Amino acid sequence: MGAFTVSAISRWTGRQKKSPLATLDDNLFRPLATTIVGGCTTPVVAAFVAANPGDGVTTTIVNLARTLEASAGRRVLVVDGNLSNPCVHDCYGLPQSPGLSDVASGTANLREAVYV
């Protein structure tokens, strides 16, 4: 399976200590949201990975989810699969547990790990 670029997001200068929810303008993520969802009315699954810590995957995911919810009226489920340093829960002010590893190990069920 080959990898390809579906959209590019302009670089921003400087690292910000704020939550990724407050750092970027929705307009930066609209092209990516449009590329991923398009006119599709069925559920869409997208995975985001990075080679190095600090590459901006969490910022991209959190802002893309916000853009999809706000501009496209889509419901979004964000799953933080970074088991070594999960941090999406911090962006939304949620507890770290129960989460993906709890569901995978059987110590929690999916309903307990999904926050609405």
Image (tube, grey):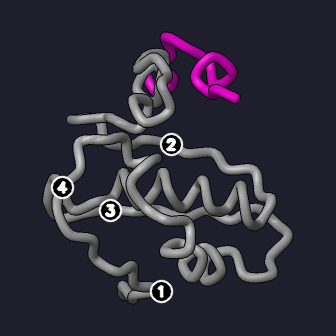
N-terminal label among 1 and 3: 1
Q: Give the CA separation, mark 4 to mark 3.
A: 20 Å
Q: Give the CA separation, mark 4 to mark 1.
A: 24 Å
The type of residue carrying mark 1 is Val
Mark 2 surroundings: few (<14), some (14-19) or many (≥20) residues within 10 A: some
Residue under label 4: 15
Residue under label 1: 6
The type of residue carrying mark 4 is Arg
Determine the secondary structure under disc 1: loop
Determine the secondary structure under disc 3: loop
Mark 1 surroundings: few (<14), some (14-19) or many (≥20) residues within 10 A: few
Give the label on residue 79, or none. 2
- Residue 82: horizontal and vertical position, in percent? 31, 42
The type of residue carrying mark 2 is Val
Per the image, is 34 magenta?
A: no
The type of residue carrying mark 3 is Val
- Residue at x 37% of width, y 41% of height: 19
- Residue at x 46% of width, y 62% of height: 47
Q: How many marks?
A: 4
Give the label on residue 49, or none. 3
N-terminal label among 2 and 3: 3
Tell which residue pokes out farthest to the top in this image.
107
In the rendered image, which quarter is residue 8 located in?
Answer: bottom left
N-terminal label among 4 and 3: 4
Give the magenta part as a residue range: 103-116
Q: Give the CA separation, mark 1 to mark 2.
A: 20 Å
Q: Give the CA separation, mark 2 to mark 3.
A: 12 Å
